[in-house]
Amino acid sequence: MYELSCFLPQEKDLKISVYDYDTLTRDEKVGETIIDLENRFLSRYGSHCGIPQQYWISGVNTWRDQLKPTQLLQNVARFKGYAPPVVSENGRKINYGGQDYTLEEAEANKILHQHLGPSEERLALHILRTQGLVPEHVETRTLYSTFQPNISQVL
């Protein structure tokens, strides 16, 4: 994972170039792609690649979105015209869209790990995953060569 800072809209294009690795000869460019960061940030899908399976507070799967699941759930409720979600005091029950969700039903048959976060965040993430949102995924992009810009490069 690489984390970079930029100023939108001045530095909106992220150019990624892929090179092969040769031990005896010069490394050659396989291809490149350009990602419009401003377009991605302002899209209705947000700047993330979907909703993860679990809410982790540490380790390699640490939550990467700038908003926590409870905040995302509030945004989805506002978008759908629902009342804001109501979280119980112990964080083990959330009323969303007129329905009660409990942590016990969300985590049935799951092994709890030390890296998992607070119960209200885990439950909010469970509710988000039932809303038909895009699940976390790996994005694939076509690479184009500067020598043959109209032909996609296959690895």
Image: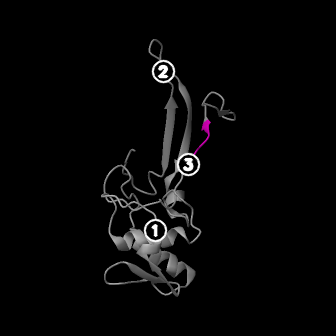
- Other-residue count near label 1 (Cα within 10 Å), few / some / many at <14 / 14–19 / ≥20: few
Q: Earlier in the sequence, mark 1 or mark 3?
A: 1
12 shown above or below 103: above
In the image shown, does 76 or 38 lie closer to the viewer? 76
Q: Earlier in the sequence, mark 1 or mark 2?
A: 2
The image position of residue 32, as x and y in percent, is 55, 36
- Other-residue count near label 3 (Cα within 10 Å), few / some / many at <14 / 14–19 / ≥20: few
Q: Which residue is mark 2?
A: 27
Q: Nearer the viewer, mark 1 or mark 2?
A: 1
The image position of residue 55, as x and y in percent, is 39, 62
Residue type of the residue flagged with mark 1 = Ala
Q: Which residue is mark 1?
A: 108
Q: Is residue 140 magenta?
A: yes
In the rendered structure, which segment of residues is drawn in magenta? Answer: 139-143
Residue type of the residue flagged with mark 3 = Glu
The secondary element bearing badge 3 is classed as loop
109 shown above or below 15: below
Q: Distance from label 3 to label 2 (Cα)?
A: 25 Å
- Identify the image quadrant of the C terminus: top right
The secondary element bearing badge 2 is classed as loop
Residue at image coords 52%, 22%: 28
The secondary element bearing badge 1 is classed as loop
